[in-house]
Image (cartoon, rainbow, N blue to C red):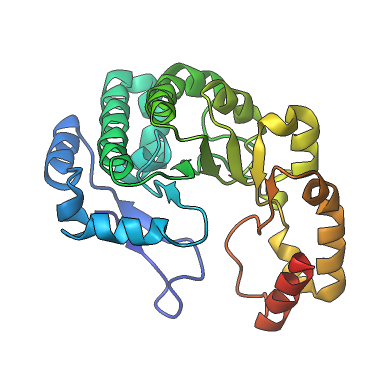
Amino acid sequence: GILMRELKKNPMSSMPQFVKFPVETREDFRKFWRERMQPDLAQRIGPDWPDQLRAMRAQPYPLIIVADRWGGFFGPLRNLVGIERLCTLFYDDPAFLEEMMDANADFIIAIMTQILETVTIDAFAFWEDMAYKTGPLISPSLVRRYMLPRYRKVVDFLSSRDVSFIGLDSDGMIDPLIPIWLDAGLNFLYPFEVQAGMDVLAVRKRYGRQLRIWGGVDKRALARGPRAIEAELARLKPLLDEGGYIPHTDHSIPPDVSFENYCYYMRQLKE
């Protein structure tokens, strides 16, 4: 429901300009939720969704459910009301904010109930994207006050259904938020964006193996060629040796990375 402008020539090459968001009032939110956010998987995916899920579970790799774009208590609300409005709602109308957060917690649990009645999963991840280059978009105190109880509600539900690994995706400088996410019961995070100052070696030193780490490979090294790729993987070798770490790039691969360089990176990573 977002109205935005993108470059005609290459719409995926840059950030769009956001013009209008679907929710401006509490009534807008209730209408949006009533009409669009119903957790009926037969309607959302198709009547054969259990068979699709069982086929995924039968494959020889982990089954990970990432609640991308809708599974969280900041990122999804940003998509509804816009980033500036969301940040001010923490002060101007916290009751409206909490109504949206509670609705989303219940929505996640309703969908995951259906999934976990059908298959077991290896990991679940929230999606937030709530930090920029130098820090979070809201203060840690607000995250602890408003978001932590909702994380805890979902985490307690998932843990009661034997989901062992529960984590979260957020770009940017997330250091101030890691203790809160650990208190909420999360045990992995990603993607640890290097250009925002995130260093997975420092994170491991600070939090130990209680926090599993995904990502942290500087995507910019891939553009610079073989020597830079080798140096970046050498930097991360202590984590690779120690374990509790899944290496991958710290965000989407940018267009200045050649296919040849990417293949070289994958070969070196495998070795």
Q: How many callouts does the rendering have? A: 0
Asked whether residue 134 appears in the rendered view, the answer is: no
Residue 232 found in image quarter: bottom right
User: Who is closer to the viewer here, 3 or 195?
Assistant: 195
Report the residue at 12% width, 39% height from top.
Answer: 34
User: Who is closer to the viewer here, 227 or 254?
Assistant: 227
In the rendered image of this protein, does residue 36 appear above or below residue 17? above
Report the residue at 19% width, 30% height from top.
Answer: 26
In the rendered image of this protein, does residue 52 appear above or below residue 169? below
Rendered location of residue 130, percent (x, y): 51, 39
Residue 175 found in image quarter: top right
Q: Is residue 215 left or right of residue 42?
A: right
Rendered location of residue 39, percent (x, y): 20, 43
User: Who is closer to the viewer here, 180 or 27?
Assistant: 180
In the rendered image of this protein, does residue 265 appear above or below residue 260? above
Rendered location of residue 134, percent (x, y): 66, 39
Report the residue at 15% width, 34% height from top.
Answer: 30
Q: Is residue 75 left or right of residue 103?
A: right
User: Who is closer to the viewer here, 254 or 10?
Assistant: 254
Rendered location of residue 233, percent (x, y): 81, 60
In the rendered image of this protein, does residue 29 appear above or below residue 16? above
Q: Is residue 271 left or right of residue 189?
A: right
Q: Quadrant of the N terminus?
A: bottom left
